[in-house]
Amino acid sequence: MTDSNALDPEDRKIVTLARSARARNGVPEGAAVRDDTGRTYVAGTVDLPSLKLSALRTAVAMAVASGAASLEAAAVVSEAGGVAEGDLDAVRDLGGSGTPVLLAGPDGTVRGTVTAP
């Protein structure tokens, strides 16, 4: 477990944004990514009959659609114990190998950090 107060303020910001998206939309996951210019993109899980995307893949897609060239970091707020491999692949595709992904519980407590492969 990581003390969320010990996080860099920019990392704490994306955790807070991801947590807010999850709560506001009543979805299983919230995610936020920060691009190389400091802009943030926030999303929740998409669960439509014809389209299903995790919150993190949605946030990465929003960054790409907005013209982001790279990612600095990502955060996911979920009850899940880890980040799906496909989600890490999406982060790697835009941010490169080694991009940190913070995983936090619904209360915003960061449980760990994984990196895109």
Image (cartoon, rainbow, N blue to C red):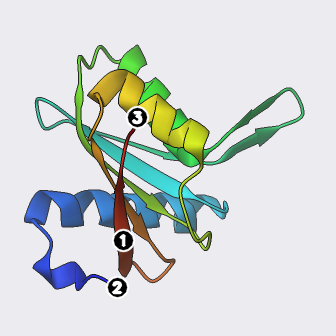
**Which numbered circle lies on residue 1?**
2
Residue found at x 51% / y 57%: 30
Residue with the mark numbered 1: 112
Query: Given the image, on which type of amino acid does mark 1 rest?
Result: Gly
Residue with the mark numbered 3: 91
Within-10-Å neighbours for mark 3: few <14, some 14–19, many 20+: many
Q: Position of residue 89 (x, y in %)?
A: 49, 32
Query: Given the image, on which type of amino acid does mark 3 rest?
Result: Val
Query: Given the image, on which type of amino acid does mark 2 rest?
Result: Met
Residue found at x 59% / y 49%: 84
Judged from the image, the secondary structure of the residue bearing numbered disc 2 is: loop
First of labels 1, 2 by sequence position: 2
Q: Position of residue 95 (x, y in %)?
A: 28, 29
Circles 1 and 2: CB distance less than 8 Å? yes
From this view, report whether residue 53 is shown above or below residue 101: above
Q: CA distance from mark 3 to mark 1?
A: 16 Å
Q: CA distance from mark 1 to mark 2?
A: 6 Å
Q: For this view, does 103 lie left or right of residue 45?
A: left
- Judge by depth and name the residue closer to the eye, 113 or 45: 113
Judged from the image, the secondary structure of the residue bearing numbered disc 3 is: helix
Residue that protrudes farthest toward the right in the picture: 49
Circles 3 and 2: CB distance less than 8 Å? no
